Image (cartoon, helix red, strand yellow):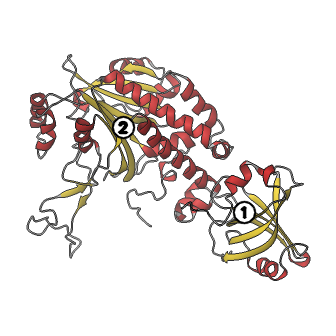
Amino acid sequence: MHWQRPRKKLSEILSSSSSYIGETINVSGWLTTIRKQSKNNFAFGTLNDGSCQNNLQLIFSSEYTNKEELENFLQKSTTGVSIHASGKVVESPAKGQEIELQVSSCKVLGTVDAKTYPMSKKRHGLEHLRKFEHLRPRTNVIRAVAKVRNQCAKSTHDFFQNLGFQYIHTPLLTANDCEGAGETFTVTSQYPKTEKPTSIYKRKEFFGKPVNLTVSGQLHGESYACALGEIYTFGPTFRAENSNTSRHLAEFWMIEPEVCFIDLDDLMNLAESYLKHCITSVLQNCKSELEFLNGKFLDPTLISKLNHIVEKPFKRISYTQAIEELQKADKEFEEKPEWGIDLPSEHERYLAEEKYKCPVIVYNYPEKIKSFYMKKNTDGKTVQAMDVLVPQIGEIIGGSMREDNYQTLKEKMEEKEISGLDWYLDLRKYGSVPHGGFGLGFERLVQLCSGMTNIRDVIPYPRYPKHCNC
């Protein structure tokens, strides 16, 4: 059975406007603007149903609109009201639109109290919209971002599925901290009776031991990669990092491919190819959204920047070369660039925005600043890690080849006092293979593709310190 919706989507109508002229159609949606002339029983309205960025103009008149329904509409209609309308598509005499709908029948589905409705037709700042997370998708800007986010998700699955990668669902509840940073949310079934935290006792705790929300699906993903060859994960991750910046969230989504039988060059090629695929997909399928986001309200150079990323090869330099370039830069940095530091955002953005003016892949980082599972180079000082840096954001992808030697990994874990990962060591004990992978913060990808400067505006319901409202 093929399901059919009882209405025409505006995306279908407006993509081939001329073919609908003379047809009678049904549409449903929300009024974005309304102008009424009650004395003449006449009104202009613009309708959006969420399917596209553009609106359809509706014309209500006593000449062709049901009299009783017209009076009810004129009485109840305000910005935000939801309606169902039927009518004839005609050529529009107005500039900027090919067609309009002469409404013959109209039903008001949901009214709005104009005095209290916070999404008025005037332009609101993004900070104001964050106060109304449940209503902000009705605005042009958040609707456009949502479309870009959807396309990034679709193109992610398309990219890896077309390459034959298997999509793996890794657990959200885990007994390990992948990065060893300790910034995890503890999950417990014990609710404290006082404000004072209580100890988690094995005899009472649901899992019999402390469990936390995952910070990464990588370790679990490796186990499936070492059986299936090529996998990817795409799911929510959680960091209890007390950071109130425009770049951090407590809950965000990660894409983490893991691939066997490759080397570091293969991994860098995969990261570059994936990023370019997603951006190309957005450029091709979100044209009206990008045209809006490319306007004066946000970044007027967004589309040209995205095309530039797709067209040019990414620059690749070693961490040592990156430090040398930063030291030669005619620029004052807050943190002095010295070999051995973890590159801060200002260094990453300088390399991508000013020095090379394109995405940069930095590889072979000092072992001391990277995670225990990264494969050591023969120089004894660096590991086979790589980060992709992009303009405006900095790091968008972080990855590495994984240490595949059992004894070497065991010694590194003992040195760093990492326990509880015997199952992870087993992967090196039984049929170990060279393998690597990376993690991409999905919200940063949406930021890159939409031009939004604050990460809180590219996720439907942002979670950050002291904020979890809906």
The crowd level at tag 1 (other Cα within 10 Å; few <14, some 14-19, many 20+) is many
Disc 2, SS: loop
Name the residue located 11 percent from the left edge and 40 percent from the top edge. Answer: 417
Find disc 2 in the rendering and name its residue: 165
The picture places residue 56, in percent across and down from the top left corner, at 75, 58
Find disc 1 in the rendering and name its residue: 47
Disc 1, SS: strand
Q: In the rendered view, does 83 fall on the left or right side of 88?
A: left
The picture places residue 27, in percent across and down from the top left corner, at 71, 65
Q: Quadrant of the N terminus?
A: bottom right
Residue 54 visible in the picture = no
Name the residue located 22 percent from the left edge and 47 percent from the top edge. Answer: 177
Q: In the rendered view, does 180 fall on the left or right side of 119?
A: left
Query: Do residues under tags 1 and 2 come within 8 Å of each other at their CB atoms?
Result: no
Residue type at mark 2 is Phe
Sequence-wise, which precedes: disc 1 or disc 2? Answer: 1
Residue 246 visible in the picture = yes
Name the residue located 52 percent from the left edge and 28 percent from the top edge. Answer: 353
Closer to the camera in the image, 295 or 430? 430
Vertical side of 224 occupied by 127: above or below: below
Vertical side of 378 occupied by 199: above or below: below
- Please tell me whether mark 1 or mark 2 is closer to you in this view: 2
Vertical side of 65 occupied by 331: above or below: above
